[in-house]
Each structure stands twice: as C-alpha cells, then as structure tokens.
Image (cartoon, rainbow, N blue to C red):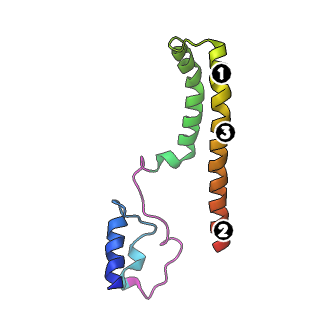
Amino acid sequence: WDLARVARSAKRTRLLKGRAYAQPEPFLTSNIPNPPGLKDLRPPEQAGFETFWITTTARLLSFFGSYAIFPFITRFLDHFVTMEPVQLDEITSKFGPGISILYGTFISLTLSILYSRQQTI
C-alpha cells in the first residue's frame, strides 16, 4: 500500500521532461557484469542551443551586450520620464531602505538554508 502511494506521488510530482544524468547503455541488463567507467558516466549529448546559455560565450555576450546597450536605453527613456529631482529624491529615500532590508532578508534566509543543509551532510 505504501509503495503504491509513493509511486503515485512520484508520478504527480515528476517533471514533464525526464532528466538524464548518464549514458543509459552501461546500465542495461547485458552490461551489468561490466562496471561503468568515467566515459560511461558522462551526461548524454544535448542539442547545441539547449546548452548555449551555460557557456562562457553566452555569459560574456549577456554582460557586455547589456553594458553596451544601457546608455541607449537610458537616453531613450529620458524623454518619457519627466520628474523633478526633488520628487525623485523623496521616492528613493523611502524606497531604497525598504528594498535593501528585503534583499538582506533574502540573503540571510538563503544562507541559513544552505548552512542547515551543510550541517545535515
């Protein structure tokens, strides 16, 4: 009974796309007597565009692209934002501390969770 409940729960919470962490061939029944090596444990090949965003090239393009386009975006938006400097100072003086407290709380919570996970290892 408990095993069936676990199986139903696993089916409900399973991701739509299966995960593959290693080549399936070394784990076939015919290959059970042969222990897998490092070459067998490598992840399966994926399409080029699926893994593009984790490459150094994509990270550099994202950083330098946004760095290069930022002045143009600010000049374009400058025509639409018409606010007096005093009014902007009022908003930032009230908004800034609240956001910094919020991000500080997020960082503290994240570090607390990571520390508790590290203790259970």
Looking at numbered disc 2 in the image, what kind of residue is underneath it?
Answer: Gln
Asked if one can make out residue 24 in the rendered structure from this viewpoint, the answer is: yes
Q: Position of residue 48 (x, y in %)?
A: 42, 49
- Mark nearest the camera among 2 and 3 is 3
Give the side of residue 76 with respect to residue 44, left or right.
Answer: right
Q: Give the magenta-colored segment's residue range.
A: 31-50
Which residue shows up at 33% across the image and 59% down it? Answer: 16
Circle 2 residue: 118
Looking at numbered disc 1 in the image, what kind of residue is underneath it?
Answer: Glu
Residue 24's place in the image compared with 114, above or below, is below
- Residue most extreme to the bottom: 33
Q: Secondary structure under badge 3?
A: helix
Circle 3 residue: 100
Residue 107's place in the image compared with 24, above or below, is above
Circle 1 residue: 90
Residue 54's place in the image compared with 119, above or below, is above
| Secondary structure mostly seen in the magenta stretch | loop
Residue 27 on the magenta span = no
Separation (CA) of disc 2 from disc 3: 27 Å
Give the side of residue 38 with respect to residue 87, left or right.
Answer: left
Separation (CA) of disc 1 from disc 2: 43 Å
Q: Secondary structure under badge 1?
A: helix
